[in-house]
Amino acid sequence: MTVVDMHTHFLPETWPDLSQKIGGADWPWMRHDGAGRAMLMLGDKEFRPVQEACWNSARRLEDMDRDGVDIQIMCATPLLFGYQRPLQHAIQNAQLFNDLALEICAQDPARLKTLCQVPLQDIDAACAEASRAFNNGHVGVQIGNHVEEKNLDDEGLVTFLQHCAGEKIPVLVHPWDMLGRERMPKYMLQWLVAMPAETQLSILSLILSGAFERISRDLKICFAHGGGSFAFQLGRVDNAWRHRDIVRQDCPNLPSSYTDRFYVDSAVFSHDALALLVKTMGEERVLLGSDYPFPLGEQTVGELVRSQPGFSSRAKRGILGENAMRFFDLEAVSSKSEAMLA
Ligand code: CO
């Protein structure tokens, strides 16, 4: 079998000074501190420390061999999205990082794949860049889970999702730009509380607005971090739909009946949570995703799934790779991972 980690992040080692090249201020850049360490900067502010696995494909491949991962699918860190920028700046920004991502993959294109990013503040431009990148070798598109106040049920964002469905471009939805940040200044609470809520909000906005009734079933869409708070709170949503007309006014079917319209990754870090997730979504709708190489990611990629009590080997093979092979329509690579499947 082929093991696929479909949620990993990259940063190029360097990129041009975007204020000079594109215009505008406070762009992200990298301050290299030596010994494979760097600081991702935003203007003159330190945003977060990062390490060389972000940009060094030889290091990525070593870590993949260590963990028995055959294919990694990389995507940008959301800080690079540029959704708040003027449109022409955002288009150049997306193209620049999309092209740099392919350079990181070029060392081993069969094993290193990447998702593109798009200037999602403009739907025509976003569709054009998604198609350009997909034709250039990106295997899908990563989008942030909202654009300022617009959730995924926004008419323009639904149009973008329809475009992806029509062109068979798989979509990964990643939470970003977290709600309530003024109340979460410490302890990474934005990542621990707001990110799972953002993802749940996105899924529910598609379900309760009736957007899934209008979007083609051809759409392949996956939500990061196991769908955030979605699975654990789904009973609450179904109960609300049954007993309050304002919950079901735009949603003709029970919310839990829409779980056949989307996928989630496996980044939940707990056997109990993974068991609930697979019970909720079905074993064919959970894809191995680690958030490699960040500290909040799975440190030995695939370990949670491989050691999951009570999963059949068929379920494990699906989650570890076969589901993602179908989702992204990937070609198998000769596998080093078979022996590691418990
Ligand atoms: Co991530």
Image (cartoon, helix red, strand yellow):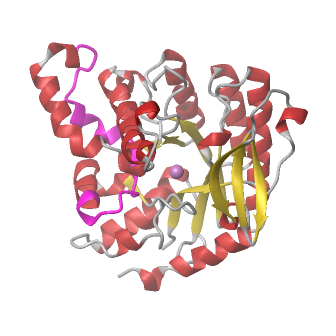
* Left or right: residue 16 compared with residue 46: right
Residue 209, by quadrant, is top left
| Residue at point 65%, 53% (across, down) | 114
Q: Is residue 331 visible?
A: no
Residue 21: x percent and y percent? Answer: 89, 35
Above/below status of 153 relative to 335 = above
Query: Range of the magenta residues?
Result: 249-273
Hey, which residue is sitting farthest right in the picture?
20
| Residue at point 75%, 36% (across, down) | 27
| Residue at point 21%, 26% (across, down) | 253
Q: Is residue 261 magenta?
A: yes
* Left or right: residue 213 compared with residue 157: left
Above/below status of 128 relative to 12 = above
Hey, which residue is sitting farthest bottom in the picture?
339
User: Which of 148 and 237 lies nearest the eye of the viewer?
Assistant: 148
User: Which of 52 and 323 lies nearest the eye of the viewer?
Assistant: 52
Q: Is residue 288 magenta?
A: no
Residue 24: x percent and y percent? Answer: 81, 27
Q: Quadrant of the C terminus?
A: bottom left
Hey, which residue is sitting farthest left in the picture?
243
| Residue at point 26%, 20% (across, down) | 251
Residue 229: x percent and y percent? Answer: 31, 43
* Left or right: residue 227 compared with residue 299: left
Q: Is residue 219 visible?
A: yes
User: Which of 73 and 283 lies nearest the eye of the viewer?
Assistant: 73
Residue 172: x percent and y percent? Answer: 52, 43
Total numbered labels placed on residues in the image: 0
